[in-house]
Amino acid sequence: MSARDLWNGLWGAASRFYEWGVSAFGWASDYISIGAAVVIPIVVFRYLWRQIRSQ
């Protein structure tokens, strides 16, 4: 096994890991977007409510 073989093997493994991550995030992105669409307005509302009540 040469250094080139080791490098190519590591590069290939990193490339497969990256592709796996991209495909996993692509699948989950719809659910993350839905969660953010629900959670962010709730957080903003709570923050504004606390600001109004403290005055």
Image (cartoon, helix red, strand yellow):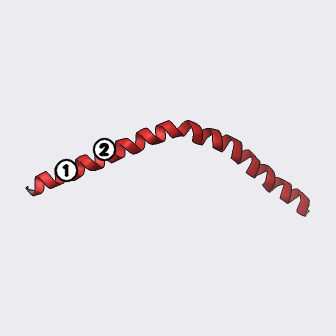
Name the residue beneath numbered marker 1.
9
Name the residue beneath numbered marker 2.
16
Residue at screen point 12% across, 51% down: 5
Is 23 rendered above or below residue 7?
A: above
Q: Quadrant of the C terminus?
A: bottom right
Instruction: Give amino acid for label 1.
Output: Gly
Residue at screen point 19% across, 50% down: 9
- The answer for how far apart the CA atoms under marks 1 and 2 are is 11 Å
Circle 1 SS class: helix
- In this rendering, position of residue 30 left or right of residue 4: right
Q: Residues within 10 Å of mark 2 (few under 14, many from 20)?
A: few
Looking at the picture, how far across and down is residue 7, in whole percent?
Answer: 17, 54
Q: Residues within 10 Å of mark 1 (few under 14, many from 20)?
A: few
The residue nearer to you, when weighing 49 against 21, is 21
Q: Residue furthest bottom?
A: 54
Residue at screen point 76% across, 48% down: 42
- In this rendering, position of residue 23 left or right of residue 42: left
- In this rendering, position of residue 52 left or right of residue 23: right
